[in-house]
Amino acid sequence: MKQAPEISVVAPCHNEEGNIPALVHQIVAALTPTGRSFEIVLVDDCSTDGSWALLQQLGAQNPRLRALRFEYNCGQSAAMWAGIKAARGGIIITLDADLQNPPSEIPKFLAALDGADCVCGSRVAARAKGDNWVRRVSSKIANAVRNKLSGETISDAGCCFRAFRRECVAEVKFFKGAHRFLPTLIKMEGFRVVEIPIAHHARQAGRSHYGIWNRLFKGLADLLAVRWMKKRTIRYKIAGRINE
C-alpha cells in the first residue's frame, strides 16, 4: 500500500481553468523545499470550462495531483468537504483556487501549527491596502455579524486559507455554507485555533463567485444554525473512573 503523505493541500475549483496550472505550480514550489511529503487534491465542482480536461492532463504529468469531479454543481462547501474527506495527509491545508491567497505562504501555516491545532489566515490587514471600499465594508460587516451572533473572535471567517490536523474535522458535521464557519466548528470539538496575517492578491483569471449578497445575507441561516449548535453542545468533564 502506498504510504500516506504528511500534507494534503485541498482546493475546490469551479471554472478556474486560467488559474489551475499556476496554482499547482505554486503549491509544489512552496512545499518541495520543506522536504515533507505532500499531495494536492483539487475538486472540480462541475466546471463548464476546460478545468476537468486540464486536470486530467496535469494529473498525468504529476502523480502528486489527485482530482475529483462532481456530476453536478454542489457549491463550495460540498467541494471543500469532498476534498477534505479524500485527503490522506495528517495535516490538511485548504485554500481557494483563485490565487488571491498565495500558496507561497503555506510554510507560515505549517510553522504556526507547532502551537495550535488549526491555523486560519486573516486578510484584514492586506485588504485594507488593496480592496475597494465596497469589499472592505461588506467583509467587515459580515465578520462583525458572524462574531456577534456566534460568540466568535475570528477576524476573517470567510478566508478559506487554513491548515489543521486531520483529527480536527474527524467529528465535524459539515453542511452547506459550513466552510465559512469551520474555525468555530473545530473550536467546538475542543481544538486550539489561531489566526495569522496573510497576503491578498487581485484575481488574475476567471470570475469571482461572490458579491455583497453572498457576504452579508446568504449565510444568515447558517450563522443562526451555528449559534444554536454552540448553545446546545453537550459539555462534561469526567471526575473519576472505575475499572478502566
Image: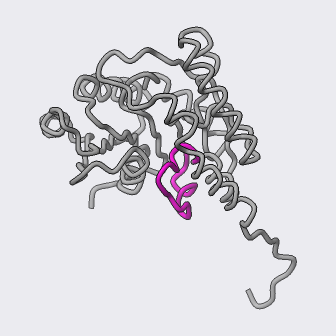
- Work out whether residue 108 or residue 172 is closer to the camera in this orientation and state it: 172
Does residue 107 appear left or right of residue 85 in this picture? right
Residue 20 locus on image (x, y percent)? 27, 28
Q: Quadrant of residue 52?
A: top left
Which residue occupies the extreme top position in the image?
Answer: 129
Q: Is residue 180 magenta?
A: yes
Residue 77 locus on image (x, y percent)? 43, 48
How many numbered markers are drawn?
0
State the colouring used for the structure image.
one colour
Asked if 216 appears above or below 203 in the picture, the reply is: below
Q: Residue at x 28, y 48 (%)?
A: 73
Does residue 105 appear left or right of residue 87 in this picture? right
- Work out whether residue 61 or residue 200 is closer to the camera in this orientation and state it: 200
Q: Quadrant of the C terminus?
A: bottom right
Q: Quadrant of residue 190?
A: bottom right
Q: Quadrant of residue 58?
A: top left
Residue 219 locus on image (x, y percent)? 55, 45
Asked if 27 appears above or below 235 in the picture, the reply is: above
Q: Residue at x 40, y 30 (%)?
A: 31
Q: Residue at x 57, y 52 (%)?
A: 222
Which residue occupies the extreme bottom position in the image?
Answer: 243
Q: Is residue 188 magenta?
A: no
Please provide the residue range marked out in magenta: 164-181
- Work out whether residue 137 or residue 158 is closer to the camera in this orientation and state it: 137
Residue 228 locus on image (x, y percent)? 69, 60
Q: Quadrant of the N terminus?
A: bottom left
Which residue occupies the extreme right position in the image?
Answer: 239
